[in-house]
Amino acid sequence: MKLLIDAGNSRVKWALWDGSVLSPVHALPHAELGRLAGQWAALAPKAILAANVAHPQVKQAIEALAPGAVQWQRAQVAAQGVRNHYRNVNEQGADRWLAVLGARQLYGGDLVIASAGTALTIELLTAEGDYLGGDILPGYRLMLQALAQNTAQLDRRAGEVCAFPQGTEDALATGAIDALCGAIERMQRRLAAHTGRSPQLLLTGGDAALLQPHLPHDARMVDNLVLYGLANVANGS
């Protein structure tokens, strides 16, 4: 059994991997990381694989609480049948790379992988295993926060997403969703033009459910892609 840890910008998620099945996933906000000591007390994993995009203090806390040495993962030039075309893999977030590996573990074909959390990342992966890179943009709440903090009259609750926003609250909600979904759809078209095939869209992350109703009906919701990416690495190590 191996312990897999995904330390994101707001939460830490973890699960156990037996080589074929992921256990139920646990999640804690950063403020409650001390609870990991009790959750991990009885574990004796063969290995601990982790990814961190949070503050270094979160990484240090995990190392102090983990039941063994933590193998921190980084983006690579190639792994598990995927070739990374990122210009400088050392600057790429481990979560983005692992989400791509997790997607490949679960699905074949051309993939657009949209991870909707604090930020929205959109990754492009071909059926042949070429990871072509992707986009990073503010997530739904960051967009609204930026408007609230940097404009005089937009510090208000977002309304409903609608075809013709006729109030400021609805305009805020619709504008943010249109921007996020528009970026995803542009990347879908870009990958389709590159390969000549229609890619599958995968949605993951805490805000994926916000976006799904406004995207093509064949978009698939897939939870915990980073953990599945760590599982893919664990199987290959």
Image: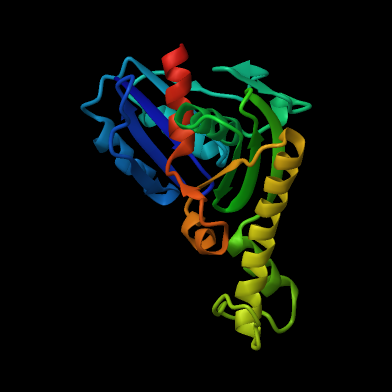
The residue under the point 74% across, 28% down is 86
Estimate the x, y position of residue 143 in percent, counting from the top left.
66, 64
In the picture shown, does residue 158 fall above or below 203? Answer: below
- Number of marks in the rendered image: 0
Q: Is residue 78 at least partly visible in the picture?
A: yes
Residue 112 coordinates in the image, percent (x, y): 61, 41
Where 136 sits versus 109, above or below?
A: below
Horizontal relation, residue 19 to residue 175: left or right: left
Where is residue 75? Give x, y as percent. 62, 25
Q: Nearer the viewer, residue 153 or 181?
A: 181
98 displayed left or right of 61: right
Furthest-right residue in this view? 87
Give the image location of residue 96, x and y in percent. Answer: 60, 36
Find residue 151 and report its image quarter: bottom right
Is residue 22 toward the left or the right of residue 106 in the image?
left
Q: Residue at x 64, y 23 (%)?
A: 128
Residue 145 visible to an observer of this rendering: no
Quarter holding the N terminus?
Answer: top left
- In the depicted view, which residue is nearer to us: 157 or 193? 193
For image coordinates 33% across by 40% down, the residue present is 25
Image height of 206 relative to 226, above or below: below
